[in-house]
Image (cartoon, rainbow, N blue to C red):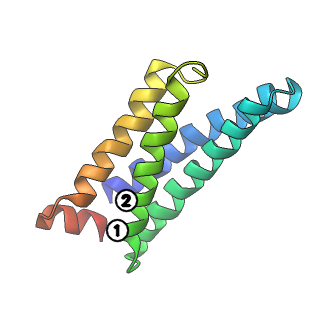
């Protein structure tokens, strides 16, 4: 249940940042790259919510969905933190990529505790 709650919290934080990026820099600022990054952030945020629900409801494909979500979160956050984009601050990188990495490690581990956490 802890991972479900963390997924929702990370999704909300990531989603708010992505919407801000999309609207302020993408639409109002008329910049293409922030617009695309905002859309990608919203997609990753929605995947966090869906994978959280999948873990909570114990869907048969929850493990695969969590692996995809965690991997995309890591890739998204690392890409955003690297030059020339640097749309992401250090705290957001640590939260997004760090949580994605922890989620991926927990999901890929074969212990009973991980299976109970994922569903």
Q: Residue at x 72, y 39 (%)?
A: 36
* Residue 110, quarter of picture: bottom left
Q: Residues within 10 Å of mark 2 (few under 14, many from 20)?
A: many
Count all numbered tags in the image, as a single digit.
Answer: 2
Residue annotated with mark 1: 63
- The quarter of the image holding the N terminus is bottom left
Q: Residue at x 39, y 61 (%)?
A: 66
Q: Nearer the viewer, residue 52 or 89?
A: 89
Labels 2 and 1 touching (C-beta < 8 A): yes
User: Residue 87's x, y, as percent?
Assistant: 61, 23
Tell me: 20 left or right of 97: right
Tell me: 2 left or right of 26: left
Q: Residue at x 17, y 59 (%)?
A: 109
Q: Nearer the viewer, residue 81 or 28?
A: 81
Question: From what the image shows, is residue 22 above or below residue 88?
Answer: below
- The quarter of the image holding the C terminus is bottom left
Tell me: 62 left or right of 116: right
Q: Residue furthest left?
A: 111
Residue annotated with mark 2: 67
Numbered mark located on residue 80 in the image: none
Secondary structure, mark 1, is: helix
Secondary structure, mark 2, is: helix
Q: Residues within 10 Å of mark 1 (few under 14, many from 20)?
A: many
User: Residue 30's x, y, as percent?
Assistant: 87, 27
User: Residue 114's x, y, as percent?
Assistant: 20, 61
State the CA–CA distance, disc 2 to disc 1: 6 Å
Question: From what the image shows, is residue 52 above or below residue 41?
Answer: below
Q: Residue furthest bottom?
A: 60
Q: Residue at x 64, y 45 (%)?
A: 40
User: Residue 116's x, y, as percent?
Assistant: 21, 68
């Amino acid at each position: 249940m802890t991972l479900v709650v963390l997924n929702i919290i990370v999704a909300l934080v990531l989603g708010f940042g992505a919407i801000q990026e999309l609207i302020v820099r993408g639409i109002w600022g008329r910049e293409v790259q922030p617009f695309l990054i905002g859309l990608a952030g919203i997609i990753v945020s929605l995947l966090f919510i869906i994978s959280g629900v999948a873990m909570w409801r114990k869907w048969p494909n929850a493990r695969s969905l969590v692996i995809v979500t965690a991997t995309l979160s890591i890739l998204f956050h690392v890409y955003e933190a690297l030059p020339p984009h640097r749309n992401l601050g250090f705290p957001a990188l640590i939260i997004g990529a760090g949580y994605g990495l922890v989620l991926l490690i927990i999901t890929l581990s074969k212990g009973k505790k991980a299976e109970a956490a994922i569903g």
